[in-house]
Image (tube, rainbow, N blue to C red):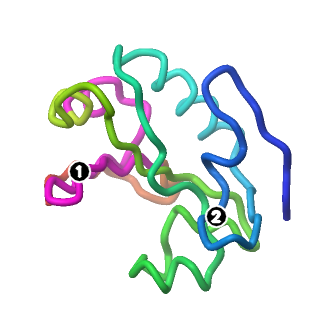
Amino acid sequence: MTVILRTKNFQGHELKCKCGCGLLNYDNFFLMKLEVFRDLPGSRLEVTSGCRCIKHNKTVGGKPSSLHIAEGKTAMAADVAPLDVNPQKIFIFAVKAGFFNEVIWYRKMNFIHLGIDRNQKEVYYDII
């Protein structure tokens, strides 16, 4: 499924599957939160991984139940990297903002996973 997406802070090419298949299928609730979050930290954020097809998710080592998967469902996750501020600041801000119930800072790869899992009862914050 290919959808043309353009909001104040995002263009579709940032969020679609990086394998070239053109898949772009996001949950509107998640996108609304991501949109607001990108405005708040005072930092430019690059989307390093948006939605994924099943094949690409497997290629990049994603979990079979990844919130990035947008094939047969809407994606509920994005990975972002700050371009002009310490990633720790963005991680702390994401935890405090409470927009997402999954916030994982992958320190060695310099990106932060932001996700909303509607089946998850507890919040999950981690630094890997």
Q: Disc 2 residue type?
A: Cys
Residue 7 in view here? yes
64 relative to 15, above or below: below
In the rendered image, the vertical position of residue 99 relative to residue 108, given as above or below: above
| CB-based contact (under 8 Å), mark 1 and mark 2 | no
Q: Position of residue 48 (x, y in %)?
A: 44, 52
Question: Can residue 123 be seen by looking at this rendering?
Answer: no
Q: Secondary structure at mark 1?
A: loop
Q: Position of residue 114 (x, y in %)?
A: 40, 46
Query: Residue 104 in magenta?
Result: yes
Q: Residue at x 72, y 44 (%)?
A: 12
- The type of residue carrying mark 1 is Asn
What is the span of residues highlighted in magenta in the rendered image?
92-115
Q: Residue at x 48, y 17 (%)?
A: 39
Q: Which residue is mark 2?
A: 17
Looking at the figure, which quarter contains the C terminus? Answer: bottom left
Which residue corresponds to mark 1? 110
- In this view, the residue in front, 34 or 19, is 19
- Residue drawn 63% across and 57% down? 75
